[in-house]
Image (spheres, rainbow, N blue to C red):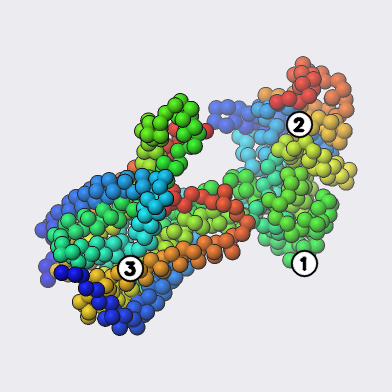
Amino acid sequence: MPAVLIEDVHKSYGKLEVLKGVSLSVETGQVVALIGRSGSGKSTMLRCINGLEAFQSGRIEVAGHVVDQDPKHLRALRKDVGIVFQSYNLFPHLTVGQNIMLSPRITKNVPQAEALALAKDVLAQVGLSDKFDSYPDNLSGGQQQRVAIARSLAMQPKVMLFDEVTSALDPELTGEVLLVMEKLAKGGMTMILVTHEMSFARNVANTTVFMHQGKIWEQGPSKQLFAAPQTPELQGFVKAGAQD
Amino acid sequence: MPIQFQFEPIFAESDRIVDGVLLTLGLSFGAIVLGLVLAILLVAAKSLLGRWVGLLVDAYVELMRNTPFLVQLFMLFFGLPLLGIRLPGTEAALLAMTLNLSAYATEIIRAGVDSIHRSQLEAGLSLAMTRRQVFQHVVLMPALARVWPALSSQFVLMLLASSICSFIAVPELSGTAAIIEQNTFRSFETYIVVTIIYLVLALTLKVALDRLGRAIFPRISSVDRLDAKAEAA
Amino acid sequence: MTTFGWPEALFLFRAAGWTLLLTAIAFLIGGLLGGVLAIMRLSRIRIVRRIAATYILVIQSIPVLMVLFMSYYGLSLFGVELPPFLAASASLAIYVSAYLAEIWRGSIESVPFQQWEASASLAHSPAQTYRHVILPQAVRISLPPTVGFLVQLVKNTSIVSVVGFVELARAGQLVNNATFDSFRVFGLVALIYFAICFPLSRLSRHLEKVMNASRPH
């Protein structure tokens, strides 16, 4: 039973069709990189998986939940599917620790002491134990993004989505975030990441999916895909080193 | 003929003045607290309870903001007895001030809520929060922090507007001034003293509210604060 | 006791006419004064700035009711007894001048500083800069809050009965005393005020949208 099953999904913004029949299957523990130019539909596809975007036709099933726009279903789904955003989206008025503990406490009724222990644990996993009482605006971009990952991890998700999480970071800071993601991957987390980091995709993701003009253009084991792109579009994309 | 000022009769009435000041402050703080709570509830209702409730809230706000406070006061004071509800002047004044302030505060807080970036909402929803939880834990405090200067200005305006309650013989500061004027026949002296007291009250309140804002909302930098001028108009 | 009928309603409508006239006069005179104050507020001469700033701060920190009383009784100290309409207009004009001065000063300061630089680089004198570059933009920026303030002014005319002038709110009080039909009387009064203020409020919001849309990014 795949962790994520996407069947022939179509999505349009008004008259503009951005997803033109996307189908994808992701097994538990698999790490999938979604690459492509801006406008290829990769972020939209990712956001459809946890219901942030609605789609007009097709079917998505993730971690045993069918994706529709019913709020109750979405909430249940989002306890099992975590997402990390390009702009981290930490809550600026809460400390790091409070950011992480908030959702487990109010959506899963985790008692305070347990939530505290959980928060400290995930924060240690991303290497930021000493920042528990800091506020987000006192942290660097890389640190904030790692906190964002910890915040999602605290929900103990079955699948994690990453939406260009290093694109907003200065180059020196991407390394620390990618390291955390690699650790997660090695630990067996099912991950789908939209990324521009080609070497990360090649080395850490089992499968790479290249999207172009709203369709899956090519997909396959990462090392092979990058070594021998089949289509001219992917060849051009790889050669350009993922310039947008 | 040289102008002769006689302030002694005014100062002789200082007990009455103090009572007037206390009532002004009591009415104002009461209206501020109650009005703020009501406004938060109205903004929450508009955000969470769907389109029709939102339109009702909008209608209430528009009605209160486009009619004079005095007329609202008259409506409550003279109208409620016709429904069998006899409110004494002071209570009617408090009710009118609360309702009036709540409408302005709703508008201001709503602007703050709207200014919270969509990405914050998405983050909260993606963490499996209900929309109510997102409103309560992610949106409300930052929104209040952003609009605190505009809200503070509105609170001070309410303090000044309490003077209008003298029209229904409430013995707050302006009502007291009218009584003192009648007793002493010294109009200018009475009103200059009362004016200065209002000035001191208003400036003190503004400073106090600014301090309070910095204490409750330490994390929001001044860059983030929404323009108080735009809201005050 | 009379019933609330057409004669009473007409009385209210006529009073509304006076409200509008009072608003217009106070706005015009207060606007002129406010313009002068705004310029003073931006003057290079510190004492001029201070005087204007103090005046504005004081007026904005006291109830409009007190502005009315202070100007009315202040004038009567000098033996000047103005008829109610003029007393009301003059007092309101003072109130208006402070608020408009602040709005307009804010608008001038909102013009991006790059405009000053660009104009100076084209060898314009300060006066020319003001006239051709800054003020036209400042006027556009000031339209939404100025119209918004007009709404406040209309509502504040409701208290000028303290200087003896009968406008709409006072008329309502009089009719209410005669008929005791409070809901109808004040309901109609509120409706008339609403009919005046709501379009102005909408206009202000519309102007703000138009302005935000055309602002260069």
Q: Pointer 3 and pointer 1: residues touching (CB < 8 Å)?
A: no
Chain at numbered mark 1: A
Q: Which residue is mark 2?
A: A196
Q: Amino acid at mark 3?
A: Thr
Q: Quick check: C88 above or below A200?
A: below
Q: Is residue A69 above or below residue C155?
A: above
For numbered disc 1, what is the local secondary structure? helix
Image disc number at residue A113: 1
Disc 2, SS: loop
Residue C217 on image: x %, y %:
52, 33
Picture quarter with the N terminus of chain C: bottom left
Q: Secondary structure at mark 3?
A: helix
Kind of residue sitting beneath label 2: His
Q: Left or right: A88 with respect to B195?
A: right
* Residue under the point 36% across and 38% down: C139
User: Which quadrant of the structure image shows residue A55?
Assistant: top right
Please report, as a chain letter, where disc 3 is located: B
Q: Nearer the viewer, residue B55 or A20?
A: B55
Q: Which residue is mark 3?
A: B195
Q: Disc count in the image?
A: 3
The residue lying at 82 percent from left, 32 percent from top is A201
Label 3: few (<14), some (14–19) or many (≥20) C-alpha neighbours in 10 Å:
many
Q: CA distance from mark 2 to mark 3?
A: 66 Å
Counting from the top left corner in percent of width and height, residue B2 is at 19, 70
Nearest the camera: B219 or B116?
Answer: B219
* Residue lying at 70% horizontally and 40% vertically, measured from the top left: A86
Residue A91 at least partly seen: yes
Q: Residue at x 28, y 48 (%)?
A: C33
Give residue C186's position: percent from left, percent from top: 24, 62
* In-front residue for pair A174/C126: C126
Real-space CA distance between mark 3 and mark 1, rounded to the nearest whole angstrom? 56 Å
Identified by mark 1, the residue type is Ala
